[in-house]
Image (cartoon, rainbow, N blue to C red):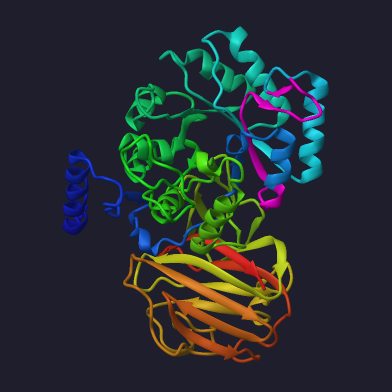
Amino acid sequence: MKINWKVSLLAIALLLASGFGLTAGENIDPVAVQEDGNSQIGRIPYSEVRIREFPITMQCWTFRKFTFMETLEKVQALGISYLEAYPGQAFSKDMPGVRFNHNMDEAMRKLAKKHLEDRGITLISYGVVGFDNTEESMRPVFEFARDMGIRTINTEPKYDDLSLIERMVKKHNVRIAIHNHPPPTKYARPETVLNLIKGLDPRIGACADTGHWLRTGVDPLEALRMLEGRIMNVHLKDLDRFGTKDALDVPFGQGKANIHDILAELTLQNYYGPLAIEHENPNDIDNPSPPIRKGVDYIHSITHYRGYEQLLKNRGGRFNKHGWNHYGPGYFLLDEKTGVLKSVGGMGLFWYSAKKYTDFVLELEYKCSQKNTNSGIFLRVPDMPVNNDYIYHCFEIQIDDASKGIHATGSAYDAEAPTQSAAKPTGEWNFYRLTFQGGRIQIELNGVKVLDWKAEPRGKVRDFSREGYLGLQNHDSRSPVYFRNIFIKEL
């Protein structure tokens, strides 16, 4: 294996910096190298990360001065569709003494479900809730979670033996997330959580509270990197100060947490869980909605893929090819952990059969294994491919660094040549942005516009459809092509 000395030196620098303890704001971008077949994927700097859209959840503790029913109304007004409940919130002004918790009877659970459904809000997590290390104590919490459709229970166990919790997780298929409060609590530091859950069922992980890490003097970015792969839930907070328990919550983007880089790190980790808002500033307790709205607006402003659909789905921490089919020889291998596709053999077409698209922006990343790697992205394939005739009725946006003109990378294959070359060297990831609106095709490669063309039948293309499927080509067995992060937005 050839040693990349630049990567090695930077990795050493990161280790040294970590050992001396970086403070919040001193963010060195990671270069964590992963294996992808015979190639390497290097993490890009946070400033270059295209942040994914995360589901935003409201932690009901934010509205602890109000009832559960009032909270639903306020959450709906904020445009938030997911909820994280905590045990003990007053249920309704009309029901004095009734609390929302796992001891509610069946009638109260049905009532809660009805009001959630009426508001279009989904209850997905619950906590922080405590229970003893006995099945008698745990069972009501897990059964409540399963009955209410709750995916994750947040807790802070007082004991180190989690074998019973693990059995309950396996039995009920509900995840456990270990939450962190500031010292002197047990889980103030991320390494404590990591050591506790090591070797346990992967559905047992961390509820990462960025605000409490800041109060503890822990850089959230260091903590997230340490817990990579075991983060079940995130309590997202931004604070006005670092390293003091008296720090106050502020709208996202206005404090010391570095929310942009936190979301970039979660994107790089392929974290697909929620971001739970838990605004605890006592000065806002009577009306926390305005700072929450400001914070959500900031998240939207830094989210690159807002409103996009991801075409390689991630379910339960694993990518899958649901909705995709393959025509012709060869196939694509999918790394279910990283979401990277690798072509094998050919010539064939890996096409997204779940939907036809009319006007859209398609964004994806690709990488060539060799200089002569040949592939392409097919736009508006008119019908289900049953033979090779489809190539005459849709456009292929070419990937071929060894060719020129109308067959070069960035061309509408056999029809219109790119205005310039913008591909990165072989082995590096490239970013394609393909816009097909009406009859116009615009192509950006690595941020450079290489094609802006009013499409017309030309070369091999006899005609093209107003709508159709999308497809990725596997060309041959000699030079694989890799794809990842395939997103589409309809226009």
Q: Is residue 316 magenta?
A: no
Residue 10 occupies quadrant? bottom left
Give, as a single range, the part of the protein colored magenta: 76-100
Question: Horizontal and vertical percent for residue 124?
Answer: 64, 36
Is residue 220 positioned above or below 149 on the image?
A: below
Name the residue: 40% across, 83% down: 403
Total numbered labels placed on residues in the image: 0
Is residue 411 positioned above or below 7 on the image?
A: below
Name the residue: 47% across, 18% down: 157
Question: Horizontal and vertical percent for residue 406?
Answer: 49, 88
Question: Horizontal and vertical percent for residue 156?
Answer: 47, 22
Question: Observer-nearest residue: 333 or 201?
Answer: 201
Q: Is residue 83 magenta?
A: yes
Residue 205 in view in this figure: yes
Question: Observer-nearest residue: 303 or 44?
Answer: 303
**Which of the image's four quarters has the C terminus?**
bottom right
Residue 93 occupies quadrant? top right
Residue 347 in view in this figure: no
Question: Observer-nearest residue: 81 or 307?
Answer: 81
Question: Horizontal and vertical percent for residue 204?
Answer: 49, 27
Secondary structure of the magenta portion, mostly?
Answer: loop
Name the residue: 55% across, 83% down: 442
Residue 199 lies left or right of residue 436; in this view the side is left
